[in-house]
Amino acid sequence: KNEVEQSPQNLTAQEGEFITINCSYSVGISALHWLQQHPGGGIVSLFMLSSGKKKHGRLIATINIQEKHSSLHITASHPRDSAVYICAVIVDSNYQLIWGAGTKLIIKP
Amino acid sequence: NAGVTQTPKFRVLKTGQSMTLLCAQDMNHEYMYWYRQDPGMGLRLIHYSVGEGTTAKGEVPDGYNVSRLKKQNFLLGLESAAPSQTSVYFCASSYWGRVVGTGMNTEAFFGQGTRLTVV
């Protein structure tokens, strides 16, 4: 079993829909990253969370440390949000990063 | 402020050739990482460094060597390239709060990637 599981693996939605991508993990963590990788390949760090919730524009990230679960939400989705979204956790014992496999999001106009 | 810069961006190697990928960061970060990204496998850690002069093995270190002679640079070397090393390589850096004892966390910054093909 992978230590970081993302769901869904692929998601196609219409422009304007509310999007949720989930990340569950099985290790003790000190923080969790959400990153975005566009078709061109570049990776951008969206959020780093250790508790609660963060919001940036139309993006919202939440984390529940007790349940070992995080969600990334996109409100009023737009085709430019089409990308792969990656969850990564920082293991609290050795500060290494463990990566999820990513969720490929396609937003259709 | 360039952030994290990787060179080269693209490279084609013949089997058995050697090369070095350079990662440079100008943010005074302690931690630097080399990852490879393969279709369907996500990012896998090759090697990492927690400070100048230190290196450590990650998940998939075989066939690679690294050096961190200067804090701002993290080099990834392939001594004898193999087709299995065809991949996209990403460098990242971060300034972990633990290093300065705050326990807080900071962002990781990524380079733009190096697409390596070994034929």
Image: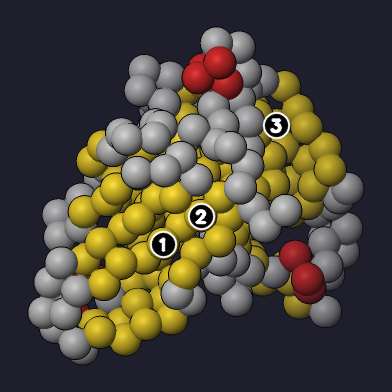
As drawn, the label of residue B24 is 2
**Quarter of the image that includes the C terminus of chain B:** bottom left
As drawn, the label of residue A62 is 3
For mark 1, name the chain.
Answer: B
Secondary element at image label 2 = strand
Q: Is residue A84 visible?
A: no
Looking at the rendered structure, the kind of residue marked 1 is: Leu
What residue is rendered at 20% in x and 57% in y? B64
Q: Is residue B104 visible?
A: yes
Looking at the rendered structure, the kind of residue marked 3 is: Thr
**Closer mark to the observer between disc 3 and disc 2:** 2
What residue is rendered at 58% in x and 55% in y? B4
Placement of B96 over or under A61, stated as above or below: above
Looking at the rendered structure, the kind of residue marked 2 is: Ala
Q: Estimate the spatial distance between the alpha carbons at disc 3 and disc 2, rounded to whole Å.
A: 32 Å
Labels 3 and 2 positioned on one and the same chain = no
As drawn, the label of residue B115 is none
Q: Residues within 10 Å of mark 2 (few under 14, many from 20)?
A: many
Q: Estimate the spatial distance between the alpha carbons at disc 1 and disc 2, rounded to whole Å.
A: 6 Å
Q: Residues within 10 Å of mark 1 (few under 14, many from 20)?
A: some
Residue B83 occupies quadrant: bottom left
Q: Nearer the viewer, residue A69 or B41?
A: B41
Q: Are marks 3 and 1 in contact (CB under 8 Å)?
A: no
Q: Report the side of B26 relative to B35 (left or right).
A: right
Residue under label 1: B22
What residue is rendered at 40% in x and 70% in y? B88
The percent position of residue A83, horizontal first and vertical second, equals: 64, 66
Q: Are marks 1 and 2 in contact (CB under 8 Å)?
A: yes
For mark 2, name the chain.
Answer: B
The percent position of residue B27, horizontal first and vertical second, equals: 63, 42
For mark 3, name the chain.
Answer: A
